Image (tube, grey):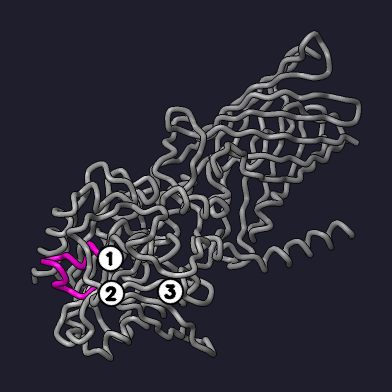
């Protein structure tokens, strides 16, 4: 009897635990954003020719509220460009990966600010709630709300669907795909996914080699492989062939295969690991591929 | 960056390369004899720069149905902490034995997992162990070696992709210290024989990029 009670109690207690909070790698807290002065780990550092004029670096505080939440969360974002020209500019909304904060991704955002020429397009990047100086704790729905909060800001500044391009890298591909497949404030006109997740199920099954349900481990609903089926806008997939974190064949390829919209294009980067795509491609090639895709269609 | 992401996924990857416990009941119990065990250990991974076994814990119980057949069941307690009720239920069969010298046994089992939180993820995988054991100088303690495999019968996996792999083979080598009431079992495994361990979210310690090593300890009380 005592043993049975112990088992029942264990089940009750264990059923309350969740793994989801372990998925978010937001532990690297900072006191302020240092951008070019940041000396922590980065995927690459651009030379001086990629410098952004100070006047074009705009730190933003936005208010984000997910459905069902009773109060808003303050999140931080950076807009690279001239806010007064947003009303006519094309904007790349960059959804970063799972590492820490925007300082880590600053070089990537700067690179995007050079697509088709220096500051040709505006670039907006945000720290999801719980990342960097954004308040709150990360959640999947909160992450989508944070990206949507950026879209609201852009819409207030005059951006329209046709001038919005969404770019997701790694974890950020979840937001990019979700908000393109199920638009909220704005509907991006094009989607770019770098090293995308297929789904949580793919991750679990890749590693276990078994047909094991993802919900053994997480309540996350991230499922780019399914959501991409709803996307009709032009789609560019970029992935390293040596991605040791998200296998390009089991993750990226299925997303690419499941897309059935108006136009798709892929660029596989030979030998590139998960974080190496821009550097292995070469910045010039990277910018050229993105620039051509954005100009097309 | 990848390494940091990987470390955050370690708990998520708690099942990977499967074996959460050492081989059960290398030698069958005597008829009507009972045994309870607690085991600790799992696949070896690089974590924060150091090799560690993933800390699986398991409680198990066995009962001697005959002198040649032992029934057993287990509860994987680490998995339970994360909302998964996992158990293996099976039998150990004595196939051949020369008393106190050498023997051969087999353990067919069912690996059962059920997700408590979402109640959608009930899965069963058959598994089988074959072990041979040797008593050194006819002492009660013995060394053993064997092979084990899980079997995946699903034709498809997520997103209707073809399930490519249906056999997950493992090898193991162990030593059982046998006392009158207590036994101490030490086992070294090579899990996922020949299966590439990359790309993946965990830094497994394998051999030439394949499989992963595993280390286990099990304390057994007979009564």
Q: Classify A13 as above or below B50.
A: below
Circles 3 and 2 on the same chain: yes
Residue with the mark numbered 1: A109
Q: Give the quarter of the image for residue B160.
A: bottom left
Q: Position of residue A106 (x, y in %)?
A: 32, 64
| Closer-to-camera residue (A262/A67) | A67
Q: Classify B125 as above or below A192.
A: above
Residue with the mark numbered 2: A57
Q: Magenta part mainly helix, strand or loop?
A: loop
Provide the secondary structure element on which disc 2 rests.
strand
Residue with the mark numbered 3: A143
Q: Is residue A29 in view from this perspective?
A: yes
Residues tagged 1 and 3 counted as in contact (Cβ below 8 A): no
- Nearest to viewer (mark 2 / mark 1): 2
**Magenta residues, as a range?**
A110-123
The chain letter under disc 3 is A
């Amino acid at each position: 009897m005592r043993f049975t009670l112990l088992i029942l109690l264990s089940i009750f207690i264990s059923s309350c635990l969740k793994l989801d909070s372990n998925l978010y790698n937001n532990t690297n807290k900072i006191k302020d954003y240092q951008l070019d002065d940041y000396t922590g780990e980065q995927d690459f550092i651009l030379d001086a020719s990629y410098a952004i004029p100070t006047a074009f670096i705009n730190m933003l505080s936005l208010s984000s509220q997910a459905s069902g939440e009773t109060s808003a969360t303050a999140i931080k974002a950076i807009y690279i460009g001239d806010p007064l020209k947003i009303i006519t500019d094309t904007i790349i909304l960059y959804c970063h990966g799972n590492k820490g904060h925007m300082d880590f991704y600053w070089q990537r955002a700067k690179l995007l600010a050079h697509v088709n020429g220096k500051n040709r397009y505006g670039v907006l990047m945000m720290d999801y709630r719980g990342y960097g100086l954004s308040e709150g704790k990360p959640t999947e729905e909160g992450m989508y709300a944070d990206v949507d909060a950026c879209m609201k800001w852009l819409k207030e500044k005059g951006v329209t669907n046709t001038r919005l391009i969404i770019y997701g890298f790694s974890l950020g591909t979840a937001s990019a795909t979700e908000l393109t497949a199920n638009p909220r404030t704005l509907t991006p006109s094009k989607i770019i996914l770098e090293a995308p997740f297929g789904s949580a199920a793919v991750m679990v099954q890749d590693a276990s080699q078994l047909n094991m349900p993802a919900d053994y481990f997480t309540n996350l609903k991230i499922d780019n492989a399914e959501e991409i089926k709803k996307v009709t806008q032009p789609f560019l997939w970029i992935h390293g062939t040596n991605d040791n974190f998200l296998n390009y064949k089991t993750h990226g390829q299925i997303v690419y295969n499941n897309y059935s919209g108006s136009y798709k294009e892929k660029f596989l980067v030979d030998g590139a690991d998960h974080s190496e795509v821009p550097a292995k491609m070469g910045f010039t090639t990277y910018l050229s591929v993105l620039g051509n895709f954005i100009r097309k269609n | 960056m990848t390494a940091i992401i990987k470390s955050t996924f370690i708990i998520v990857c708690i099942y990977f390369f499967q074996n959460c416990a050492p081989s059960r009941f290398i030698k069958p119990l005597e008829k009507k004899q009972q045994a309870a065990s607690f085991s600790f250990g799992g696949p070896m991974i690089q974590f924060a720069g150091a090799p560690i076994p993933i800390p699986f814990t398991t409680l198990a119980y066995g009962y001697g149905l005959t002198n040649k057949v032992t029934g057993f069941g287990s509860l994987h307690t680490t998995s339970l902490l994360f909302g998964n009720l996992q158990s293996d239920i099976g039998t150990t069969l004595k196939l051949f034995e020369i008393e106190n010298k050498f023997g051969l046994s087999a353990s067919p089992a069912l690996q059962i997992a059920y997700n408590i939180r979402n109640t959608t993820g009930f899965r069963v995988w058959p598994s089988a162990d074959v072990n041979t054991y040797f008593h050194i100088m006819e002492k009660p303690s013995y060394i053993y070696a064997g092979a084990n495999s899980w079997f995946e019968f699903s034709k498809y996996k997520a997103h209707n992709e073809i399930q490519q792999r249906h056999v997950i083979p493992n090898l193991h080598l162990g030593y059982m210290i046998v006392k009158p009431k207590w036994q101490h079992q030490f086992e070294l495994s090579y899990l996922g024989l020949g299966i590439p361990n990359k790309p993946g979210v965990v830094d497994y310690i394998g051999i030439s990029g394949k499989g992963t090593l595993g280390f286990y300890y099990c304390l057994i009380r007979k009564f």
